[in-house]
Amino acid sequence: MSALVISLIVVVVVLSGSFLGGYARSRLPGHHLEGDTRDIVKAGLGLLATLAALVLGLIVASAKNSFDTKTEEVQTTAVKLLHLDRSLRQLGSPGEEARKELAQMVRARMKRIWAEGDAAQTAREVIANQPNLETLEAKIRAIPTQDEAQRKALEKALQATEELAQVRSLVIAQSGSSVIMPLLVLLVFWFTVISAGLNLFAERNATTVTFNVLCALSIGGAIFLILEMDQAFGGLIQISDAPLRAAVMVLER
């Protein structure tokens, strides 16, 4: 289910809570909405609001941390590619074929990752597909060296391919969502209860209805941003592929 659909469902659920609160106000006897009862309900709503704010902050921080981690992985991959390209250039003409294969491989992977929005799944699949880092490493190992400088360049190239393989393994290990869905469902439930409780003590008019709609949209918008950050390679909020595109431009020169 897409982030937009889930956010719209959240808006409807929270609005339903406000209408439920307004309906309960019209059905309850007057003494249920006054005095100590009113104070207890408001105190409970204050407690729920505090809990909801804390949990929402934790979920946002988790999603943002996941987004930042994946962004750093993209930047690290671009740096490793540039290091590998530099080493292959130092190998002279024997390294040119490996450079071309590397550029084609990176461009194909980029296109697939940002099209499908799932870097981990793509990383798992490319291990069994060719060309991949393993075949590239074998091709680099087969490059003949003529002097000490080229031998060092070859060692650096092999080290760079190993570091790229480590980044790929890290991407696979970090697959899955960073958002705990039961916690998100509980958070939406709390917001619904808060919305219902607030409408117990307010007459329904254009102002209260407008405010309820704005609050529901704001909550839905927060959930939308959380889910979008969790889907770092797809949707409206996604990691930029600019570092990798810049690296590919260098590879293709």
Image: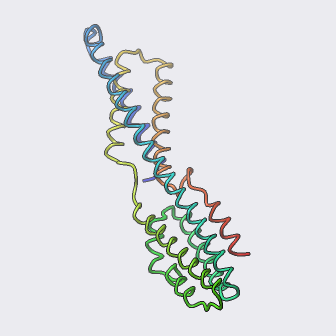
Q: Residue furthest front?
A: 148
Colouring scheme, one of rainbow, by chain, secondary structure, one colour: rainbow
Q: Nearer the viewer, residue 133 or 85?
A: 85
Q: Which quadrant would residue 19 be assigned to in this image?
A: top left
Residue at point 36% right, 30% down? 17
Residue at point 39% right, 58% down? 176
Q: Position of residue 175 (x, y in %)?
A: 41, 61
- In this view, 45 is above or below 160: above
Q: Which quadrant would residue 38 be assigned to in this image?
A: top left
Report the number of discs: 0
- In this view, 24 is above or below 148: above
Q: Is residue 140 left or right of residue 170?
A: right
Q: Position of residue 127 (x, y in %)?
A: 45, 77
Q: Position of residue 164 (x, y in %)?
A: 52, 71
Q: Is residue 89 left or right of residue 27?
A: right
Q: Is residue 44 left or right of residue 246?
A: left
Q: Position of residue 85 (x, y in %)?
A: 64, 75
Quadrant, the C terminus: bottom right
Residue at point 48% right, 46% down? 64
Q: Which quadrant would residue 30 be assigned to in this image?
A: top left
Residue at point 29% right, 9% down? 34
Q: Residue furthest right?
A: 253
- In this view, 114 is above or below 27: below
